[in-house]
Image (cartoon, helix red, strand yellow):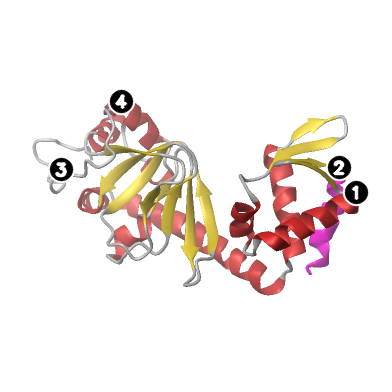
Amino acid sequence: MTFQPCLCNWGERNSVTIGAVPEDKPKHGQTLARVPIFSGLSDAELSFLAQRTVARRFAAGESVFGEGEPCAGLYVVESGHVRIFKSSAGGREHVLAIEGPGSSVAELPVFDGGNYPASVSAIDDTTLLFVSKQDFQALCLEHPQVALKVLRVVGARLRRLVGIIEELSFTTVRHRLAAFLVRLAKTSGTRSANGLEVTLPANNQELASQIGTVRELISRNLSRFQAEGMIKIDGRNVLVIDLKALEAELQSGE
C-alpha cells in the first residue's frame, strides 16, 4: 500500500515554527530512511512523510523538551547528538541514553498519550526532525508494521533501563566507571603505542550523570585507576594503558 497525498488524511500540518530551519525535504527523507521504525517504507512514502516534518535546530546545551511536558510528537536526530535524562528534586541528573543521527526519540508518549517521561537536551549543535503525534498515529494506522517496529525499539530501551537499574543497585561507582571506560575504549578508542586513547565527556559532572553518581567520586576513582597504572589522564583525554585490568574490574561484580 502506498500513500496517496490527495486521499491520505494525516491530521493537520504541523505548525511548530520555533527554532525552525530552512527545509531540505530530500535530505529529511534520507534521514528518515535510516530510522529503524521507518525502514519498511517505500521511497514515495518516506518522501511523503518528509513533507510533513519540521526541522528544528538546537544549540549545545539547549533543551528540546522537559520531563512532564505534554507530548506533541516525536523527534528524529538528523545531525548532532541529544541526551535523554531524568532529574531528581534536588537537581541531580541521570543520563538514560545518548542518541545520534538516525535515532528516534519520544515514541512511547506518542503511543500512550502521556507526557514526556524524561527530558531531552542537545549535546552539541543539533538538528532534529519533528513529526506530530497526529501524523505519526495516522502513519501507524496506514502501516501497522511501523507500530511493531516501535515496540521493538521501546523493548530495547526497556532492557537498557533494566540494565541501568541493575548497575545502580548492585555495583559500585568504581565498577561502573571501569565499565564506562571499557565501553569507550572498545567503541571509540584510538590505538597508540602505549594503549587506547579515549576522550571523556565535557566534564566530570556530565560523566557522573551518565553512570549515576557525583563528580567528586568520578575524580577520586579516576585518580585511583591512574595510580594503579590502568590509565593516564591528560585533561579530558585518557590513555587506557591496561585494558585487561579494567575488564577484570567488571568480573568482580562489585
Question: Which structural element holds mark 2?
Answer: loop
Measuring from the top left, give residue 85's x and y in whole percent: 49, 59
The reply to whether callout 2 and callout 3 are in contact (CB within 8 Å) is: no
Q: Name the residue under label 1.
A: 229
Asked whether residue 252 is drawn in magenta, I would say yes
Dividing the image into 4 quarters, which one contains the N terminus? top left
Q: Distance between the residues labelled 2 and 3?
A: 54 Å
Measuring from the top left, give residue 113's x and y in whole percent: 27, 65
Would you identify the image quadrant in which residue 46 lies?
top left
Question: Which of 202 and 167 lies nearest the eye of the viewer?
Answer: 202
The reply to whether callout 4 and callout 2 are in contact (CB within 8 Å) is: no
Residue 137 visible (yes or no): yes
Asked whether residue 86 is drawn in magenta, I would say no
Task: Name the amino acid, label 4.
Answer: Pro
Q: Indicate left or right for 189 with 66 as reference.
A: right
Q: Indicate left or right for 87 with 228 as reference.
A: left
Q: Distance between the residues labelled 3 and 4?
A: 18 Å
Which of the two discs, 4 and 2, labels the residue nearer the N terminus? 4
| Position of 70 relative to 189 (above/below) | below
| Extent of the magenta region | 241-254
The reply to whether callout 1 and callout 2 are in contact (CB within 8 Å) is: yes
Which of the two discs, 2 and 3, labels the residue nearer the N terminus? 3
Q: Mark 2 points at which residue?
A: 241
| Position of 116 relative to 83 (above/below) | below
Question: Which structural element holds mark 3?
Answer: loop
Q: Mark 4 points at which residue?
A: 26
Measuring from the top left, give residue 197's x and y in whole percent: 76, 36
